[in-house]
Amino acid sequence: MSGRGLRRVVIVGYGMAGARFAEQLRSRDPDGERVAVTAIGEEKHHPYNRVLLSTVVDGSLGRDGVALQAAGWAAEHGVDLRLGVGAAELDRVGRVITLSDGSTVDYDVAVLATGARPWLPPVEGLAGVGGEPAAGVVAFRTLDDCEQIQHTARTGAAVAVLGGGVLGLEAACALARRGVPVTVVHPVEHLMERQLDPGAAGVLARVLTGLGIEVRVGAEVRRWTPGYGLELADGRVVTADLVIVSAGMKPATDLARRAGLVVDRGVVVDDALRTSDFRVHAIGDCAQHPGTPSGLVQPAWEQAAVLADLVTGTDVSARYTGSPPVTRFKARDVDLMALGDSLVGLDAADSEVLCVTNAGRGRYAKLVVRDDKVAGAIVLGAPAAAAAITQFYDRDLPVPLDRLALVLGRTALVGGSEAPDPVDLPDTTVVCRCNAVTKSALVSAWHEGARGVAELVSRTRATTGCGGCAHAVGRLADWLSTTGNADALT
Amino acid sequence: MERGRPPAPPDERAVDTHCPYCALQCGMALTPAGVSATVRPTDFPANRGRLCVKGWTSAALLDSPHRLTTPLVRVGGELRPATWDAALDLVARRLREIRAEHGADGNAVFGGGGLTNEKAYLLGKFARVALGTSQVDYNGRFCMSSAAAAATRAFGMDRGLPFPISDLDQADAVLLVGANPAETMPPFVSHLRRAIDGGGLVVVDPRRTATADRAALHLAPLPGTDRALALGLLHAVISGGHLDLDYVATRTTGFESARRIAAAWWPERVERVTGVPAADQRRAAELLARSDNAYVLTGRGADQHAAGVATVGGWINLALALGLPGRKGSGWGCLTGQGNGQGGREHGQKADQLPGYRRLDDPVAREHVAGVWAVPADSLPGPGRTAYELLDALGTPSGPRGLLVFGSNVVVSAPHAGHVADRLGALDLLVVADVVLSETAAMADVVLPVAQWAEESGTLTNLEGRVLLRAKAVEPPDGVRTDLDVLHGLAVRLGQPPERFPARAEAVFTELRAASRGGLADYSGITYERLRAGEALHWPVPSLGHAGTPRAFLGSFAHPDGLARFAAVDHVGRAEQPDDEYPLLATTGRVLAHYQSGAQTRLVPELTTAAGGMFVEVHPDTARRAGLGEGAAAVVESRRGSTRAAVRCVTTLPVDVVFLPFHFPGDERANLLTNPALDPVSGMPEFKVCAVRLRAAPVEERA
């Protein structure tokens, strides 16, 4: 597959972005006629779905259940995959990458997909001497992390989750499902403060408490002591045998920095996913693209598709212009979505803001409308509304004229769904759709002598299709026989 | 006995028959009354004494004033009456001339899923033997060809419902995908009574249909996102712990590839693509998993996409993961649409197929069938174009110049209908055999008036693979011939020995039995006598002593290794995306009172009254933003054409989705809009979604 004249593409990082990119390359160039592909992955595992790690923690899926690529995929598709080895240096002049095992790989196009690393907050005891997590401390990023969490959880020991963001709370929910005592410790005054307003966060805390999760917000952490727990600044102690640190991610940019590429929070890229060196691209969590939220897989996959179009020449005009920031909480027991400008206050001058709260039932729905479009939303405990509002946001549709309907997950408020009594319906109402029989036809048949259900059926054919109107016809027959009057038609 | 069944008075003149319309093939007794007749439902298992308004009024077609009773030949631009001899002589001469000038493939044949097994069989034979053309296909390509291909891939055999319809009576849970039987085959719904009453009906449909109204759970994916939903449900089945591990291990293969693809489709991601709440996806998976008797049934909503085979494959995957197919009391099935949609796809009017569901490119199959036909196997042409490809090629330099149409009204029912009409107009010869002057017949050079339904005998195979005899009950009007008679007459004029193309249905069936012997759809053990005696014969019936196969796949599937195959299918988007110019998604379907192109039902006054005129369902906001109110005259436009329709406001539609029924003719044809992007395997066009825009009809356009 490494024939002469092929563009040599080297993918650094073989997680959800890098592996997806390899697949996208091969779907456009199945026979390896355009690009030769080498991929380098630090983890020993074949690529898996990180999004589903909480499902591994709660036991719904085994390790194999999250695998995204078959072990033999790379070999079958002419991808030179090297797992368990990192990239040590990127020499942009020589266009060569030196790997951690000392070997080198030449490239025409380098694609950085190095992802992000969990950030360990500067709390005494969390990090070992080399900056690695100390004993009893685990991040929540890899399958190995999950294994460590499961190992501890199996013994029935208590777990603390440090960080009340989406990932931390998903981990907490997963553990709670397994019956593990969990305490969430969050240094800010309310949970998920980047996505939720205080009202929503309050309802969420209530929901989590109902699931058996203890929630400590505004809790500054002073020290982690293995085998003891987290000591808080106010002197309280959260006893725990394990602390899952979920305090945010840092784009893995070391290689790019050392290579002299422009790096801000992540490796800076443009709409063609180019770094400051046009031969080097970056996608996924390590990349920083204007207008793209970090830490989500959808942008990474969209970037992989665009870059594959560009690198294979399938569509040289392909561009990645950003992804709408939609946060979707993935847990069976908590249905939560936040998107866009979700933190806008109820009295914002430039927006219509609707908010419905039912804390007792774990429900909260907030909709921010600007210029007739969804500008932001938070929906907790209302799955239909979450799905519907996301559709309007993603597809940039004008919101329903009846805004309140959308907060309830509909596009228009209509009358109650209970079937009305046929007696109360107008004469022109079709009672039997299958045979197009109106109420007046049934009443007329009655007056013409069809004095009973069987006779009404025989004369009008009502009920003889799907049979769904049998109850209505029976009710009309009862009504006609009790009133029995000749005025029924008038 | 259920309340609501009218008592059927005995009448010795009554003839047991079946409805002329859909694949449910409701049993009915037809009583001749002068030139007319009346029908009553019978206690046949498919309908059990029920009929919809189409069935009840079906006899009105027999004495319709619109019946054709004489051949018509175009002279000086006008269709004028002609004698049968003159018409058939003309057709045969033109067919010979075209063949001489353009080769055998210069002539083409287009059939229909409403034709009897005998007609479908003889039509395929006529094309390949009398015309020697490879260019033969039929409108079933536009119905369930995707499900047929997907089932063949998954199970090694395609029988719509591989179990008797009455098995559904015991279903606790039914997932209906892209099917609206409450409107399209109303008596079918009575088989779902237990599931409906027990809160076990789940309906997948972008619209809140009459069927969805009865569901415990309605999943409404945006048109063109069905496959993502199937993947989400598979994901939910796996992560919910509902996978039938034993079944997957012992009765299937290919699960791992399907699983890996589904791993990338967690319900929240699927929600984003489809609009179906993640919680509802999980509920649906749980509902199916915890039911003892669960079924997954797919309809045209799954079939009619440019990736329809993969979409149906996705739903079959779900059924396999739950361990449903090939077990008594559960399964996957396809709800076939047309009256003989099942039999019509088995006996050789399909571009790639020989009788008995044999493949035209299989040398053994060719030998067998050529032997029955007493022709050399190498004289049989190879596979030809699929339906839309065929229509698209008509009158082009490399395409056919002559076309014979039987039982189909393609200028209304084919996608991109305006273009199809142009292609028909470019032909040197268009011959249409029909009961009435359909929109396609009106374009023809020669129109042949043929008998219908109760006027002739023939067999049909209903949606459960049961072969039915529709016996002749009344005499056809004077001047009318049967399709078989027409084929016989043409074949003889083309120099074929008369006995090679029998005109008597039972004789054709006898030949069909021999041709199907040993094939997947083996009819060799079925006789008119057994059918007259009321035997319930589901194919395959490989010998006279064989009782038929009501439930297929019980021991093993029809692949050589006996295992069912998971399909490695991923979601890709629709063929045409909405944009600023065409921001809405149009989807098409049927209404209760009409059938297919409406050529028959639009002639029955009671049905046209019930159905009203052409309409477009629109969300009231969208209508209002376009300056339209309820009942307003609107124009719906796509890149391919525009259609006139009256606005019906429907609050349950997504704001950017409109629905159009496809039964109406002229400038009210929904198919003027639809996208002829084809499935690479089945040749199915993407009827179910295309990008459109909506505007008010200009005043001068308002009739």
Image: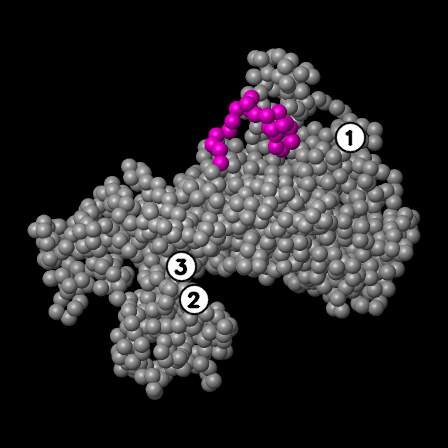
| Relative to B36, residue A214 above or below | below
**Mark 3 belongs to chain:** A
Label 1 and label 3: CA atoms lie apart by 64 Å
Is B536 placed left or right of A258 in the picture?
Answer: right
Label 3 and label 2: CA atoms lie apart by 10 Å
Looking at the rendered structure, which numbered label has been put on residue A324?
3
Tell me, yes or no, whether the highlighted magenta stretch contains residue B593: no
Label 1 and label 2: CA atoms lie apart by 67 Å
Q: Nearer the viewer, residue B519 or B684?
A: B684
Q: Give the residue at mark 2.
A: A321
Q: Is residue B512 visible?
A: no
Residue B174: % across, % down? 49, 40
Residue at the location (22% across, 59% down)? Answer: A247
Which quadrant holds residue A54?
bottom left
Few, some or many residues within 10 Å of mark 2 (<14, 14–19, 20+)? some
The kind of residue on which mark 3 rests is Pro
**Mark 1 belongs to chain:** B
Q: Nearer the viewer, mark 1 or mark 2?
A: 2
Looking at the rendered structure, which numbered label has been put on residue B37?
1
The kind of residue on which mark 2 rests is Thr
Residue B96: % across, % down? 85, 62
For the record, the magenta segment spans A414-439
Is B595 placed left or right of B623 in the picture?
Answer: right
> The C terminus of chain B appears in which quarter of the rendering?
top right
The kind of residue on which mark 1 rests is Ala
**Secondary-structure class at tag 1:** strand
Q: Main secondary structure of the magenta part?
A: loop
**Secondary-structure class at tag 3:** loop
